[in-house]
Amino acid sequence: MRPPTPSTPRTRRAPAIPRRACAPLALPLPRRAGQSAEPRGERGARRRIGCQDYEGGALAGDLCEDLCAAGRLRYRRCLYYERGKKVLQADWRGRPVILKSKEEAFASFPPLSLLEGPAEEGGQDVLEAELLLLVAGEVRSALGLELSRSRLGALWPRGRGPRWRRQLASLWALLQQEEFVLLSLLRDLSRHALPVLGSCGHFYAVEYLAAGSPRHRALFPLDGAAGGSPGGRGQAKAISDMALSFLDMVSHFDNDFSHRLHLCDVKPENFAIRSDFTVVAIDVDMAFFEPKMREILEQNCTGDEDCNFFDCFSKCDLRVNKCGAQRVNSNLQVVCDKIFRHWFSSTLKSSAISFQLQRQLREAVRECADPGGPAGDPQRAAPKVFWKLQRLLQASLRELQEAGK
C-alpha cells in the first residue's frame, strides 16, 4: 500500500472489509489430453489469470507451466477478493498453497518503460544499470529502504535467455506489490514470515497455513495438539508455546534487521501457527520498516486521533499541526492488547496453571497493553514487561510439565 495523503482519514482500528466472492474458477483447469474444447467457465478463467498472456509470450514465471499447461497447480477456492486484490487457495504438486496479487489483471500494472517498443529476444536494449536504478526505486517506494546491489540482484532474472523480456515484465508487476517485495527480502532470514515459493506473471505463491480467527477458543486451530478439555494441560501448554513464539517474533522484528519492522494490523486473521506452535505473519500488507513508518506517520493533524494509522500511533504536535514521525506505541503493546488479552484476561478455575501464576500473567498482560496508563512510555517500558512475560510463560510451562508427571 502507499502512504496516505494528509487528507486521508485514518482510524484506530483496521476497518472490517467485506469479502466478495471470486469469479467462478479464478484459476484455470488445464485442458486434458484428448479434450476437444474447454468449458465456457474454464476459458474465462484462463483469461483472468493470464494464461493467454503466458501462451502469447507476454509474461513468465516458474509456476506458469504447472499452472497453465501441466495441470500440477489446481484452483481450490477464493479466500479474498476486494478492489482487485485476489487471494486464492490452490494445490501445487500435492501441497496447499496461496496465490496472491493486488490486481486481478496483468494489464492493470503499469509496464516497465524500458521494455516498450520492439526489440529482439535476448537483445541488449535494456541496460543493467538502468534496470538496477528502477528496481532500487521500486524497493525504496515500497519499503523505504536503500539496498545494496547484491541484495537488489536477487530481485531480477539473471542472464538474457529467450524469455528474459517477459521475465522482466512479470517481475516489474511483482515489484509493484509491497508484500511480495517484503517477503522476497525476508526469504531465509525470518522463521516468522512466509517464503515466496514461485510466481506466474503478477501472481505469487506462498505456503498455505490456516489463519487464526476469534471464533477459535484459542484464536488459532490447534489440530488436536491441545487435547483434553478446554481448560486442560494440552491447551494451556499450546497457548503458552504460542505466546512465547509471539514474543520471539516481536523481538525478531524489533532487533534482527537494520531497521525495526512495524506491524500495523495485528489480529488473529493475519497470523498462523505451525505444528511446532511457531507464529507466522501470513499477511504483511501493513508491515513497514522504520523509514517507511516515519514517512507514513508524519502527516498533518489537528489532534492525536489524526495520527493513528491502524495499530501504529503517533502524537500530534499542535504547534505545527504535524504528526510526529516516531511511533509512540510498540509491536509488543499491540500484541498484548489484541492477542494476549484473549488468552490471559480471566482466571480459569479449571486451568492446569496455578491461580497465582494466572493472576501474575493477567497483570503482566494488562501492564504490557497499557504501560503506565495514558502518560506511560511504551517504548521504554517494553523491555521490562517483555522479560516479565517471558519469565511467567516459561514458569507456566514448567508447572504444566510437573503436573503431567
Image: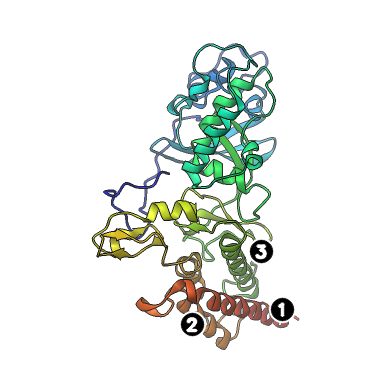
- Mark 3 belongs to which amino acid? Ala
Instruction: Say which quadrant the N terminus sits in.
Output: top left
Please tell me which residue lies in front, 272 or 291.
Answer: 291
Mark 2 and mark 3 in contact? Answer it, CB < 8 Å. no
9 horizontally vs 388: left or right = left
Q: Mark 1 points at which residue?
A: 401
2 vs 3, front mark: 2
2 vs 1, front mark: 2
Q: How far apart are marks 1 and 3 (CA)?
A: 15 Å
- Mark 1 belongs to which amino acid? Gln
Q: Position of residue 94 (x, y in %)?
A: 69, 38
Q: Name the residue under label 3.
A: 225
User: What numbered label is drawn on residue 43?
Assistant: none
Mark 1 residue element: helix
Q: Where is residue 318 in the image (x, y as percent from the top left)?
A: 25, 65
Q: Where is residue 171 in the image (x, y as percent from the top left)?
A: 57, 30
1 vs 3, front mark: 1
Q: How far apart are marks 2 and 3 (CA)?
A: 27 Å
User: Which tag, 2 or 1, sits closer to the chain's start?
Assistant: 2
Residue beneath the point at 46% across and 51% down: 292
